[in-house]
Each structure stands twice: as structure tokens, then as C-alpha cells.
Image: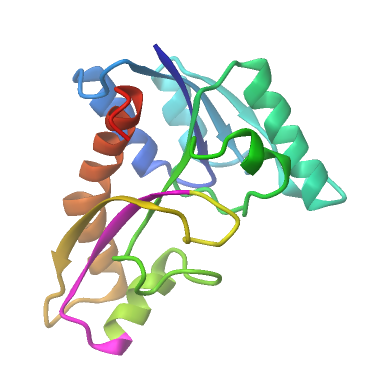
């Protein structure tokens, strides 16, 4: 059984999609055993508690350097014997030892069709605002492996979502989550756990 840690920073809607998929038997050969939050007040921690999943807070602000932060995260993962890390709205950039120790074992979901509207500074509503400003007619979500380049790792799955004429960043964000992120993230996790990627 693949031991999964989910990294979060906010509400945890993608975490909930993973929890629901696990309960429904859609994550084959994997189990979410740990939720790590960068913020003590993140609602995602309540979702983890409700689901009976162990959680821990590791705040970037608690460390002098990014390397110290990454080393602390790595220790948590090693202590819990984690096999796969899933970034689900985690608002800190990973680097250093954690990337080498978990090469091709960290996946992220991004709310656009990479390589569009991705990289440094593209997160949350900013991604959807950029898509609307540019005037694209289709957006979506991408699940990809994490490497040293922000949103630059190998793509695992993508799903397209149409942009509607009256969309706002908020309505587009909701539809991308419901129609793309919440579907392809659990699917990619299950594929990893079955050794398909």
C-alpha cells in the first residue's frame, strides 16, 4: 500500500476530493495517511480530522531559511514513511533535499492547461484572471510531477474546461475545480499507486 501525504495551505477542497475518492475505492493501492499544512488555521486540517487522518503543521515562517523549511518537511515525510506527496493547494515552493529525496514522487495540481498561465506568480484566482484577460476560450487543469521549475515537471493528466462569456475568476475557478481538478487529481494519484506512471 502506497502511503500518501497531502500538503495543503487553505480550504482543502482538493484534499476533500482525494478523501472522497479514497472512501469510494477510487484510489487503488494507496492510502492518505498524513496531511501537512503550512498554516495552522487552514480549514483543510478540519477536513483531515473529520476523516480520521493524522495532520501536522509545518509553517515556512517558523524557519530562517527555505532549506531549513524543506529539511523539516523531509523529516516529517521520512518519519511517516511516505511514498507519495500530493500538493493540493500548498502555497509554499518546495526545493532542496525534499525534491531529490522524492524525485518523481511529488505531484501537483495546477488550475490551467500547462504551459499556459503557469509558473511563478500564477496561483489561485490569478490564474483564472489571466485566462480571462487573455481571452482564451478553453482552460482546465493539469496534474504534473514537481521539479525545480515552478509548474515545470512532466505532465501526468490534463482536462479541458470551456470558458463561458459571463465568467468571472470566481465562477471559472469553481468550474475548473469541479469539472477538472477534482477528477484528474484522484485519478493521477491512483495511477501512481498502481505503478502506471
Residue 134 position in % (x across, y down): 30, 88
Give me the residue at 42% from left, 41% from top.
12
Side of 68 where 85 appears, left or right: left
158 in relation to 82, above or below: below
118 or 96: nearer the eye?
96
Quarter that holds the N terminus? top left
- What are the residue bounds of the magenta stretch? 133-145
User: Height in image: 75 above or below 42?
Assistant: above
- The quadrant where residue 40 appears: top right
User: Furthest-right residue in view?
Assistant: 64
- Specify the quadrant of the image occupied by residue 26: top left
Q: Residue at x 39, y 71 (%)?
A: 127
Q: Is residue 75 left or right of residue 124?
A: right
Quarter of the image where the C terminus is located: top left
Image spot of residue 91 (x, y percent): 56, 54
**Residue nearest the viewer, comparing 170 with 18:** 18
Q: Residue at x 30, y 79 (%)?
A: 131
Expressed as whole percent of the image width and height from the top left, the position of residue 174 reads 25, 58
Amino acid at each position: 500500500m502506497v502511503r500518501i501525504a497531502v500538503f495543503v495551505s487553505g480550504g482543502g477542497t482538493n484534499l476533500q476530493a482525494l478523501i472522497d475518492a479514497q472512501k469510494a475505492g477510487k484510489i487503488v493501492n494507496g492510502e492518505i495517511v498524513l496531511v501537512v499544512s503550512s498554516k495552522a488555521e487552514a480549514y483543510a486540517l478540519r477536513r483531515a480530522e473529520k476523516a480520521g487522518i493524522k495532520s501536522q503543521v509545518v509553517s515556512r515562517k517558523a524557519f530562517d531559511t527555505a532549506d531549513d523549511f524543506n529539511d523539516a518537511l523531509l523529516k516529517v515525510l521520512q518519519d511517516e514513511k511516505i511514498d507519495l506527496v500530493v500538493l493540493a493547494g500548498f502555497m509554499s515552493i518546495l526545493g532542496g533535499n525534499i525534491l531529490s529525496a522524492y524525485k518523481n514522487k511529488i505531484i501537483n495540481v495546477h488550475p490551467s492547461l500547462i504551459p499556459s498561465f503557469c509558473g511563478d506568480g500564477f496561483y489561485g484566482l490569478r490564474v483564472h484572471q489571466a485566462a480571462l484577460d487573455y481571452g482564451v476560450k478553453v482552460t482546465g487543469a493539469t496534474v504534473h510531477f514537481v521539479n525545480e521549475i515552478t509548474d515545470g515537471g512532466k505532465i501526468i493528466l490534463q482536462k479541458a474546461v470551456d470558458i463561458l462569456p459571463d465568467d468571472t475568476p470566481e465562477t471559472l475557478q469553481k468550474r475548473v475545480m469541479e469539472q477538472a481538478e477534482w477528477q484528474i487529481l484522484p485519478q493521477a494519484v491512483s495511477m501512481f499507486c498502481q505503478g502506471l506512471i
